[in-house]
Image (cartoon, rainbow, N blue to C red):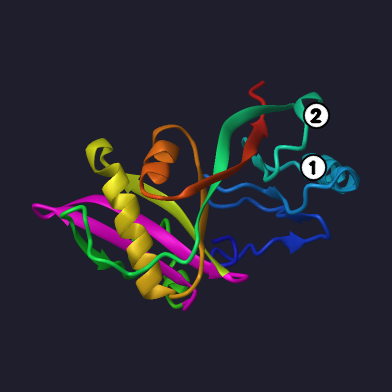
Amino acid sequence: MCFAHGTAGRFLVHTWVNAEPVPRFYPNVVTLTPGEADIAEQRQAVRILQKSNLPGRWAVKDSFRTLDIARLGFEVLLEANWIRKAQPRAATMVSGLSWERVGPGGDVFPASLFSDSNFAMFSAKRDGSIVAGGTFYRSDGVVGLGNVVAEFDDEPAVWRDLASLAAATFPGLPLVGYESGDELAAAKKAGFEVGDPLRVWVVARQ
């Protein structure tokens, strides 16, 4: 997403860092490894970014819930769990919604992203109105699922449909993501395995 917006960021050994403003709801730091020895690099990356005077409240995605950066001026925004569905199968849609693949439009997802063969976005309609959707991105032998939207009563069925769409679009690959609360419960009902916890930190309000 950052690359599509022209701010690709940088991969360190244990951390991904972006010193420029990123799209809304996306972090500027992502931890990539869980080791005790890796935390020093990750904390240092956060400190360096603090000195860069990024505008507004920016976030750190603590992928393994191993960082404690409260003393650096951060507060917990979100507690979640990783989810996984091993090689989902393309199957009949169960939600009763009308699904279609979405093309470019609007300013949230830039047009260049839709020309990336690893990216796909789907939306679902009921009675002509969009009521559900999700995005996929294929990377490193998995498909990431994010931006899932569904009305409460439809949630487990929407998650099942998205798993089927992922299998049809990117066959043979496991589906991964992270969720919390009702969305996590819906994913679990749809057959996703619930994995390790993660945490998102955000610069504390002054």
Please tell me whether residue 131 belongs to the stretch shown in magenta: yes
Q: Looking at the rendering, which quadrant does residue 2 occupy?
A: bottom right
- Quadrant where the N terminus lies? bottom right
User: Which mark, residue 72?
Assistant: 2
Range covered by the magenta-colored residues: 116-141
Residue occupying the point 36% across, 48% down: 190
Residue drawn at x 78%, y 31% is 69
Mark 2 → mark 1, Cα distance in angstroms: 9 Å
Choose between 121 and 82: the one closer to the eye: 82
Mark 1 and mark 2 in contact (Cβ < 8 Å)?
A: yes
**Residue 117: image location, x then y, percent:** 47, 78
Seen in the picture, residue 30 relative to 205 is either above or below; the reply is below
> Residue 166, percent across and down?
39, 66
Q: Position of residue 199 (x, y in %)?
A: 64, 36
Q: Amino acid at mark 1?
A: Val
Q: Horizontally, is 29 left or right of 159 in the view?
A: right
* Residue placed most toward the observer, 197 or 111: 197
The vertical placement of 19 against 43, above or below, is: below
The local secondary structure at tag 1 comes to: helix
The tag on residue 46 is 1
Q: Nearer the viewer, residue 108 or 197?
A: 197
In terms of sequence position, does the residue under pointer 2 or pointer 1 come before the other? 1
Horizontal side, residue 10 vs residue 121: left or right:
right
Q: Residue furthest top?
A: 206
